[in-house]
Image (cartoon, grey):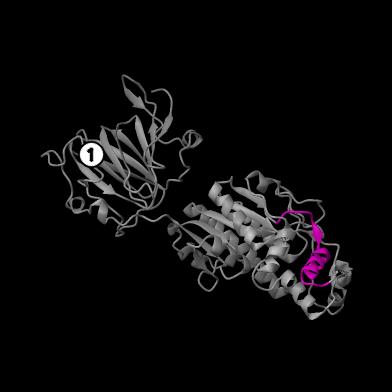
Amino acid sequence: MTELTIEPTAIPGLLVVRLPLHGDSRGWFKENWQREKMVALGLPDFGPVQNNMSFNAKRGATRGIHTEPWDKFVSVAVGRVFAAWVDMRAGDSFGNTFSIEIGPDVAVFVPRGVGNSYQALEDGTVYSYLVNDHYVPGKVYPALNLRDETAAIPWPIPLDSAEVEISDKDQANPRLADVVPMQPKKTLIVGAKGQLGRALSRVFPDADQVDLDELDISDPAAVAAWPWQEYAVVLNAAAYTAVDLAETPEGRRTSWVANATAPALLAHAATEHRLTLVHVSSDYVFDGTATRHTEDEPLSPLGVYGQSKAAGDIAVQTTPRHYLVRTSWVIGEGKNFVLTMRSLAEQGVSPSVVSDQIGRLTFTTTLADAIAHLLTTGAPYGVYNVSNGGDPLSWQAIAAEVFALSGRSKDDVAATTTEDYFKGAVDAGKPISPRPLNSVLDLTRLEATGFTPPDQLTALRAYLAE
């Protein structure tokens, strides 16, 4: 064998790796684990943290069928082994089997939840396996009886043979009909009570949902103690969004803790536990001077809120599996600009609204759907702009649309500048944050993944109709 190859099997995710052996009269050499080459051929970049060795003194030693909540990479150092696997994961492939004889020239990647078993075919057999989580003594994981009739594993040495040695524990393992399938790792929504959190909980109904009273993501001890090994994806919808109050001494501290420290702690946990982290950011990380903000634009925040969000962006991008989603002008359940304008329209008020800030609304339903799309399609990790589509509008133009949809004239909404609108607050000494005047996000990268967000006015009509 001169080339490294990887082959799929009947069990999803279980891969056979053919390893080239380079030898001469002295023996042989092989690259047992070669991350760069193997990942390039399709092996998951599974991040092993522990290397275990198993020595079998006599031919016929048989172990299994054991299921663990981690991925492993199994290979033989000395001798030959018959190996068999049974899919113990909940789903359509539950009960699927695969078996193969492996020697030094064959390795197998075993995904989490697939039961494994080995029968030594020679005396003095040694096999090793890399795993991507640490063994915890005392924990019990699903196991299957080696003699299970459903799996019907074709053992080369019959299990009733005098050569075969099986532990008492493995003799007592249940049949497949009595096995509780291993459930997939879960999704965690952080900040579940907010506008975006509520939208995400509808799109991810099986996700665990927490708020700061249950998991304070700004507390290093709380983050370290959370059972991250149970999760695959973390959706961070928590943030401090009081833009003007962030300019006060107390607000500044709160903003930095929530928007910078907390994402940094989540990013560290994501790296340590190989999680996918989805973090939501803001157009406020830009100064608003670009015609359209692309994902690659250098950060240039104007105020404390934008600065703290920019710091969070930098922290999140340190973890390999991240989706950093930048959005603008978010509208969902709860108090927001659109509902405020509708209330004013219904009360007969004719407001003045700024007309020199341009952007697009982002409805939380669109934002949640876009996040689900990135995750389910396996879009490349990285930064994505997400807003609703359509022509950019000013806040004044959006308010006028809300008035028209509420039975009032668009002319009842007067235009003003940002400077004039906040002049009274500034004169009164109230904290005011600078705003980016242009918040238009370029959606090209998002649309290239196959997701086209609805037009903001179409979404606005649907939102008010509801």
32 or 81: which is nearer to us? 81
Q: Disc 1 marks which amino acid?
A: Gln
Q: Image point 74% across, 70% down: which residue?
A: 337
Task: Establish if 57 lies above or below 201.
Answer: above
Q: Position of residue 317 (x, y in %)?
A: 61, 52
Give left or right: position of 237 versus 23: right
Res. 196 visible in picture:
yes
Furthest residue toward front: 407
270 or 373: which is nearer to us? 373
224 or 6: which is nearer to us? 6
Q: Image point 45% across, 45% down: which residue?
A: 46
Q: Position of residue 47 (x, y in %)?
A: 46, 46
Q: For residue 399, which quarter of the picture?
A: bottom right
- Which quadrant is the N terminus positioned in? top left
Give left or right: position of 252 versus 76: right
Part of the protein shown in magenta: 388-408
Magenta-span inclusion, residue 180: no
Furthest residue toward top: 25
Magenta-span inclusion, residue 397: yes
* Secondary structure type for disc 1: strand
- How packed is label 1: few (under 14 Cα within 10 Å), some, or many (20 or more)? many
Q: For residue 458, which quarter of the picture?
A: bottom right
Furthest residue toward left: 162
Look at mark 1 in the image and give the residue it sits on. Answer: 119
242 or 185: which is nearer to us? 185
Q: Position of residue 290 (x, y in %)?
A: 81, 51
Q: Image point 31% across, 35% down: which residue?
A: 76
Give left or right: position of 57 versus 190: left
